[in-house]
Amino acid sequence: MDVKINVDVAIGKHSNEVCKKAKIEGYDLIVMGSRGLGKIHDLLGGSVSSKVSSNAPCPVILIHTAN
């Protein structure tokens, strides 16, 4: 099995850049952390992980990380 992991730096809105890169590069899967800051944080603009999971061109796995 050939697994490739990409690490990249981009300038722009985080969620947009992740989704754009995934589409351009033809990603099969995005795995990212989620701090779970709650509903108040979501009302103030939402988290990067929730925006990526809603807009990504491929499946997204969110890993809950400690605050």
Image (tube, helix red, strand yellow):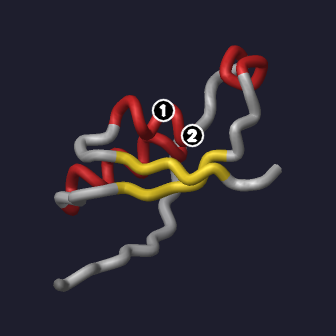
Tell which of 29 and 25 is nearer to you.
29
Q: What amino acid type should be assigned to the residue bearing mark 1?
A: Lys
Tell which of 14 and 49 is nearer to you.
49
56 horizontally vs 49: left or right:
left
Say few, some or many: other residues with alpha carbon within 10 Å of mark 1 (under 14 / 14 to 19 / 20 or more). Answer: some
43 is higher (above) or lower (below) than 31: above
Marks 2 and 1: in contact by CB < 8 Å? yes
Rendering coords of residue 60 (x, y %): 37, 47
The residue at the point 29 percent across, 46 percent down is 59
55 is higher (above) or lower (below) than 59: above
39 horizontally vs 52: left or right:
right
Q: Which residue is mark 2?
A: 48
Q: What amino acid type should be assigned to the residue bearing mark 2?
A: Val
Say few, some or many: other residues with alpha carbon within 10 Å of mark 2 (under 14 / 14 to 19 / 20 or more). Answer: some
The residue at the point 51 percent across, 55 percent down is 32
Rendering coords of residue 33 (x, y %): 59, 54
Distance from the alpha carbon under mark 1 to that under mark 2: 5 Å
Q: Which residue is mark 1?
A: 51
The residue at the point 62 percent across, 26 percent down is 46
Instruction: Give the quarter of the image for residue 47.
Output: top right
Rendering coords of residue 67 (x, y %): 82, 50
Number of numbered discs on residues: 2
The residue at the point 36 percent across, 77 percent down is 5
55 is higher (above) or lower (below) than 58: above
User: For the view shown, which residue lies furthest in the top direction?
Assistant: 43
